[in-house]
Image (tube, helix red, strand yellow):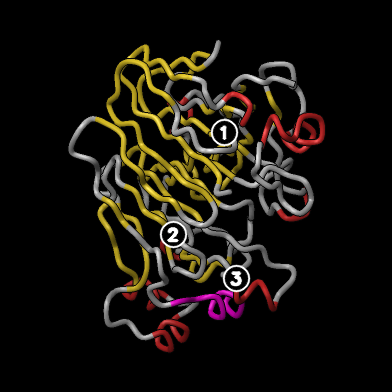
Amino acid sequence: MKLTAFTLEPVLVVKPWGGRRLGRYGKVLPEGLAIGESWEVADLPDEVATDAVKPQSLISSGPLAGRTLQSAIEIAGEDVLGPVQPTADGRFPLLVKLIDARENLSVQVHPHEGYVADHPGARLKTESWYVVDVESDGVLYHDFVDGADLAEAKDAVGTPAIVPLMRAVPAEEGSFHHVPAGIIHSLGAGVMVAEVQTPSDTTYRLYDWAEEYGRAPRQMHYEEGAASLLMHPAGAVSLPPAKATGIRELTANEYYWMREHRHCEGVFALAGRPGPAVLMVMAGSIVVDDLELDIGATAIVPASATDTEVTVTSTATFLEIGLAV
């Protein structure tokens, strides 16, 4: 089956720290709910997703419309994935989100390979943030400050004392931050990001700002989180916004790669790497195959169509994301 680019229906997730800003990015938000995340590309088993009611995106265009990604892989696996391997249970090996942090997210950590090897119920989670929008003086928390002690940090888990041990980074539109498994992190209030990650929803909360925001208590994971913490893990990169128009590589890690096309005009070829590509429009609009994608839109270009060109119809910034082979 020769496939062309296709879109998916977003999975909207209610969060206590969420807001309404995703409506500016083309999402139809249910009335009266704080929507924190829009899962743009999702193919998780029901039992591993803690907050999403149905954590699988449905394809919304093309011959596979109405199907999940897992179903699409069953029908046309090579055309969808090419040489990229699906997950062990035959699912799409990437989770892509837009996140609107109206308030601070919990201080958290995701399990690394060593922890996962000893705890079969945990799923490894490495992720990356591309900052889409910032209100006021937003910050994000990314790794420990220099000189922090891991034993001290573990003792501070569950208390406000954990906060000054984290590195607070000013959030700038167009900046990029890689968040490897094992790193302590949090998004600050007013920050909106595109998040690309391995297909996992395993998150260990270390501190939830409950008193500061008057939030209802949520499940915390002090023991698991403390055991998952790493001090300055390899690959914990932060890049400032690009100063020039053009294309730059943001990450090429063992799981996925990302490129930024910033303030672009004209026609662009995709990277030409094997496997599918995910396109996310951060500003402006583009056309890929017969799809017009405006701000906030996401599409998958399947492996059988990676010679597709992208035409910018209104000066655009978009992300191109692919999977490691």
Residue closest to the eye, 86 or 201: 86
Q: Is residue 125 above or below residue 81?
A: below
Q: Which mark is residue 113?
A: 3
Dot 1 falls on a residue whose secondary structure is loop
Q: Is residue 248 magenta?
A: no
Residue at the extreme bottom? 151
Residue closest to the eye, 264 or 160: 264
Q: Is residue 295 left or right of residue 79?
A: left
Give the residue displayed 47% in from the left and 39% down from the top.
19
Q: Amino acid at mark 2?
A: Val
The x and y percentages for residue 273 are: 50, 38
Q: Amino acid at mark 3?
A: Glu
Magenta span: helix, strand or loop, mainly?
Answer: helix
Disc nearest the viewer among 2 and 3: 3
Residue under pointer 2:
179
Give the residue displayed 27% in from the left and 77% down from the top.
146
Please give the range of residues in magenta. Answer: 222-230
Residue under pointer 1:
32
The x and y percentages for residue 33 are: 57, 37
Quarter of the image that includes the N terminus: top right
**How many angstroms separate mark 3 from mark 1 (CA)?**
39 Å
Give the residue displayed 59% in from the left and 24% down from the top.
305
Residue closest to the eye, 117 or 275: 275
Q: Is residue 125 above or below residue 89?
A: below
Q: Is residue 223 magenta?
A: yes
